[in-house]
Amino acid sequence: MSTLLLLSLITLTLFFSLSASSHHHHRRNSPVSPESSPVSNPNSTQIQLACQSTRFPQPCQTSLSQSSTLPPDPTTLQIIQSAISVSSQNLKTGQSMVKSILDASQGNVNRTNAAKTCLEILSYSDYRMDTANDGLPRGKVKDARAWMSAALCYQYDCWSALKYVNNTELVKQTMSFLDGLTHHTSNALSMMVAFDNHGDDMTSWGPPKTERDGFYESASGGTEQGFVGGVPSSLKPDVTVCKDGSGGCYKTVQEAVNAAPDNATRRFVIYIKEGVYEETVRIPFTKRNVVFLGDGMGKTIITGSANVGQPGMTTYNSATVGVLGDGFMARDLTIQNTAGPDAHQAVAFRSDSDLSVIENCEFLGNQDTLYVHSLRQYYKKCRIQGNVDFIFGNSASLFQDCEILVAPRQLKPEKGENNAITAHGRTDPAQSTGLVFQNCLINGTDEYMKYYYSKPKVHRNFLGRPWKEYSRTVFIDCGLEALITPDGWMPWDGEFALKTLFYGEFGNFGPGSNLTSRVPWSSQIPAQHVNSYSIQNFIQGDQWIPPTSS
């Protein structure tokens, strides 16, 4: 696409003020405020009140003042929906710009792959915004917040993917546009949060706050930390996978996934018999309610070895198993990535499945083992093994009764290392995302603990570090073994995110749980707010996680 056409496309886009912000590391500056004030509008007072709940009030007021979707004397929901419309219309232009990058990138493997990934995840962003817009009038405010949080996650991830191939003017222009798009989406999401917490009274609305500001979500809809639910025990297979393909079995897991109906409302159960299945498995967006049932951890094994050291490979695409369809379930199997400890990012399992339930499964890898990319996920009685940032992403994921194990890291593990177990990627304080660990055991593998006890001072392990600015991770009633350093938590890079993250602990036990030497930017969760992180409150699990006996 020519520069002239590109500039015309930007000019024609509704409501967008080009950001002149610079980008550094994982943090982005606020956009430069436009010099002109919003045009006169009969709804200006209501618009101003609504926009006071956002992080970027100037583009919020400008875009809503010019919006053709906002009726006279609008309701609160109509204002929020108009803000979603602003973001949605800008997204369409962003998709066109990324398509232009793809068309201009023949022969450049890395830029082509980045553009393809961008187009894929921007389509998911579009879908999640549509569902959020439809859900709000039906009272599904918590759902809408989760979906809009994911929409923002995908937009940021597209920007981030292009950051690594930013060697043309076209990519630079597109990144600037996407930066502004995330501001519009953030504004719509912030309004949802204000509406959820304060109702229609916009005079009480304000910018999104976090636990670091002393704000905790109210604990409504159930307060029990314990919850009896998971993958139903009564499921019957629709198809079977076996190594030899005998008796009508599929020989590969992917063939069985392909046989699942699109957009199914009932569960499609795939029984995967004992064996090692060396393949890359993808469950597409249209394959909903797919269930994997295995013969047990270490018996049914899906394995791969893709890693970012391979030409054109990204962290996102390195996953042995990647799930996009909502309602995914899995029980009694192992998913692994066998790329060595010197291979850097190599994902075993990546999930973007909303309302997903994983029970009694094992995830094995080194760096970036489990990519809980987005939306609401529940892990019960699972074993997760790795070393560097091996549970990461920007989802709202809750881990209950799980075993989290640190494995030896490099080719010469005896020399020592710094390991972070988690790296949560929340980029905006309005996103309803975070990692919650309840009643889990944090330990090392037998092999790792031999190295640790031989020289404890050089083997340092941390509960997490902030991948993004508003990283949020909590450990509640967990057993923390001796390998956890007294500091507890690890910085990412200097002071980055230390004033905005939330790292909380409550009721933990074991030699690694002593709080007296914790870093000052971590927190102890007040007892009266612990229930904000229950299954019912944090991921609304009582509404969608089935009883295990069903």
Image: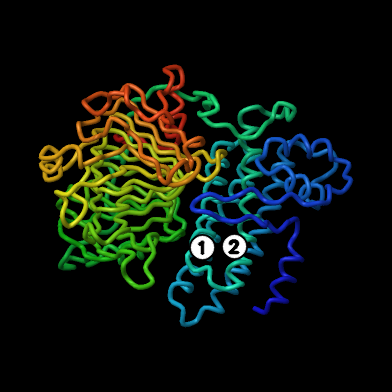
> Residue at horizontal 65%, vertical 63%?
92
Q: Is residue 73 left or right of residue 188?
A: right
Image quarter of the C terminus: top left
Which of the colour schemes (rainbow, by chain, secondary structure, one colour) is used? rainbow
Callout 1: SS: helix
Whether residue 515 is situated above or below residue 457 in the rendered picture = above
> Looking at the picture, how far across and down is residue 411, in whole percent?
17, 57
Foreground residue, 533 or 142? 533
Within 10 Å of disc 2 (Cα), the crowding (few <14, some 14-19, many 20+) is: many
Whether residue 108 is situated above or below residue 338 in the rendered picture = below
For marks 2 and 1, give the CA distance.
8 Å
Within 10 Å of disc 1 (Cα), the crowding (few <14, some 14-19, many 20+) is: some
Name the residue at the top extreme: 528
Mark on residue 175? 2
Query: Are the two marked residues, 2 and 1, in contact with CB atoms closer than 8 angstroms?
Result: yes
Whether residue 491 is situated above or below residue 267 in the rendered picture = above
Q: Which residue is mark 1?
A: 163
> Residue at horizontal 36%, vertical 39%?
490
Q: Is residue 237 left or right of residue 181?
A: left
